[in-house]
Amino acid sequence: MFTRLLLGTLAAFFFSLPAAAAAQLPDFTELVEKQGPAVVNISTTQSVRNPLLPQVPNLQEDDPFYEFFRRFIPQPGPREFQSQSLGSGFIISQDGYILTNAHVVETAEEITVKLTDKREFKAKVIGADRRTDVALIKIDATNLPAVRFGDLTRLKVGEWVLAIGSPFGFENTVTAGIVSAKGRSLPQENYVPFIQTDVAVNPGNSGGPLFNLRGEVVGINSQIYSRTGGFMGLSFAIPIDVANDIAQQLRTVGKVSRGRIGVVIQPVTKELADGFGLPRAQGALVNSVEKGGPADKAGVEAGDVILRFDGKPVNSSEDLPRIVGATKPGSKASMQVWRNKQSRETHVVVAEMQDDRAARQARRGGGKPPAAAPSQYGLALAELNETQRGELKISGGVLVENAQGAATRAGIRRGDVILAVNNQDVKSVEQFNQMMGQFEKGRIVALLVRRGANSLYIPFRVDGN
């Protein structure tokens, strides 16, 4: 009797699980009904030149070769053809301002916006910013439904989010998922702390909104990670606070202003943190400073680690470009740097980043040095002559003629110039060996290396051979 009662209780419990679980899942219907009309379909048209047209001579009909080319050479089609593409967007004001991705509209000659009520409008581009992939466009209409913006500080990893867009041209498609991560950095994307989700996003979703359960836009769907071209569970959205700031600048002044301080940075690894005496791997390591630039005037030096900027923590090197870029040019910002195993404060006047900065690159002439046999520490070193130092605009350093073993594993290459060891300048090969001899075996030191026009710090483990 007891066994039957127990089995009946367990069966009732397990059969009730699906219903209980279903009751906990969010209901998106009301959100879609209220916010869906503010999402638009964007189609663009642009002229594309055909690079594969056959080169057929312009012959008269009485020419003996005319019939040959007519019969055996394909007749050329139009040298230009119209290409069409699709994307998404969302209305942010009742008078027709729309946010979307820059890559959706930047090459378009004609933009058509289609609303959920089937009305269509021609749109004009107010402005587009490639660095954040945000564009603001405008249609001539009034009393339009508009979205509400969410508070990004309240967005949590693991909460439900929903995307509306036109994947592969299927208008007003709704997909849902959760926030997988916040502040995600992507290669070649220095100014956007992406929201990562597992919401199904495909070509055509670009520029569409990402909603939270309160019906507020928290991001613009922008990119996916895929090896097939289709959705694979990793999608990325531009935070709405970043997008709104860009939109306001485009609307008021027609361009985006960003701050710069004139430094080249690299990540702080655990090995480099140990070498610099940092309690943990954090901040942005300065490996070179633009001469006469804002950071140079503020006293920043190569080897400094920037820990805070304008009151905001720099937890990793990816944080600094975003924080500096968002700082108003001309403003004075505080900066906390780590130097010689202690923290210090300084202030820098932020300059404005130019859209088209001239590329600056210094090349060392004279050809490659002859290979030499590596000796101590896996390095074969040579002195630099005055001509080489003058071309590199340096006063010291030693040339790496060959590298193997520990040096190769650390990333040192033939042709590098070692400028400093733990921020102590290197003037000669003899001095370098003396400095390295002071460290116990197994100690990690930070070598400042000049490579081409750039400098970088390389963590190097001293092994004595």
Image (spheres, grey):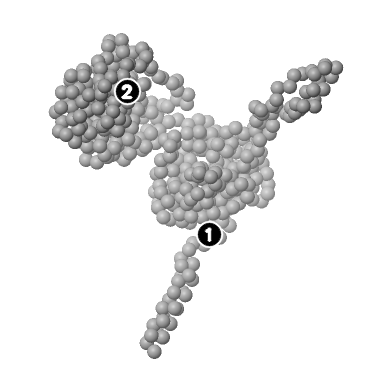
Mark 1–mark 2 Cα distance, whole angstroms, equals 60 Å
- Toward the right, the furthest residue is 62
Q: Is residue 152 above or below residue 390?
A: below
Residue 101 location in percent, x, y?
54, 39
Could you tell me the amino acid type at mark 2?
Arg
Residue at the image point whose x is 29% and y is 23% from the top: 402
Nearer the observer, 90 or 373:
373
Nearer the observer, 269 or 152:
269
Quarter-of-image position of residue 450:
top left
Residue 177 location in percent, x, y?
48, 55
Question: Residue 28 got which mark?
Answer: 1
Residue at the image point whose x is 50% and y is 33% from the top: 130
- Toward the bottom, the furthest residue is 1
User: Mark 1 vs mark 2: which is more N-terminal?
Assistant: 1
Q: Which residue is mark 2?
A: 414
Residue at the image point whose x is 31% and y is 40% from the top: 315
Residue 300 in view here: no
Nearer the observer, 118 or 49:
49
Could you tell me the amino acid type at mark 1?
Phe
